[in-house]
Image (cartoon, grey):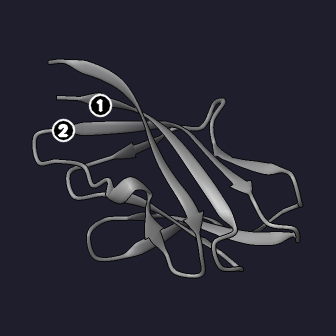
Amino acid sequence: MANAFKNKTQRQIGTSLTAIESYTVAGSTETTVIGLTIANTSAAQIEVDATLNDGSNDFYIVKAAPVPVGSSLVVIGGDQKVVLMPGDSIKVKSSAGTSADAIMSILEIT
């Protein structure tokens, strides 16, 4: 089994749930999300949602979390990790158009 650390990014996230870098776990891969940071890039406070999508359903990791101007929210990190199985993805949404950037750090096991 090979292990690889990777970053996946998404800019200008708006009001629709958006998969980070269109990343979906491949069939022969297990992925551990070791970090997810969402930054507010707008001139006003925003609220963000982050979900785990299992291919059919979205499950909230955080819902309507406030992110002040010039700040970011660490949704996953420290002691918290999220395991993704084949077909899973992480999606993010903001309360305002093109107002958030996201960086997701992962460990892929193939």
Percent x, y of residue 35: 56, 37
Percent x, y of residue 12: 59, 65
Identified at 63% across, 36% down, the residue is 77
| Residue at the far left in the pictured view | 28
The reply to whether the C-beta atoms of the residues labelled 2 and 1 are less than 8 Å apart is: yes
Q: Which mark is residue 14?
A: none
Secondary structure type for disc 2: loop
- Residue on which disc 1 sits: 108
Vertical side of 106 occupied by 68: above or below: below
Name which quarter of the figure residue 36 lies in: top right
Name which quarter of the figure residue 76 lies in: top right
Identified at 39% across, 43% down, the residue is 83
Identified at 29% across, 31% down, the residue is 108
| Residue 67 appears in the picture as rendered | yes
Identified at 17% across, 48% down, the residue is 26
- The residue under label 2 is which amino acid type? Thr
Question: Is 4 on the left or on the right of 75, as rendered?
Answer: left
Quarter placement of the N terminus: top left
- The number of callouts visible is 2
Vertical side of 45 occupied by 24: above or below: above
Q: Which mark is residue 29?
A: 2
- The residue under label 1 is which amino acid type? Glu
Instruction: Decide: few, some or many residues near mark 1? Use Cα within 10 Å; few <14, some 14-19, many ≥20.
Output: some
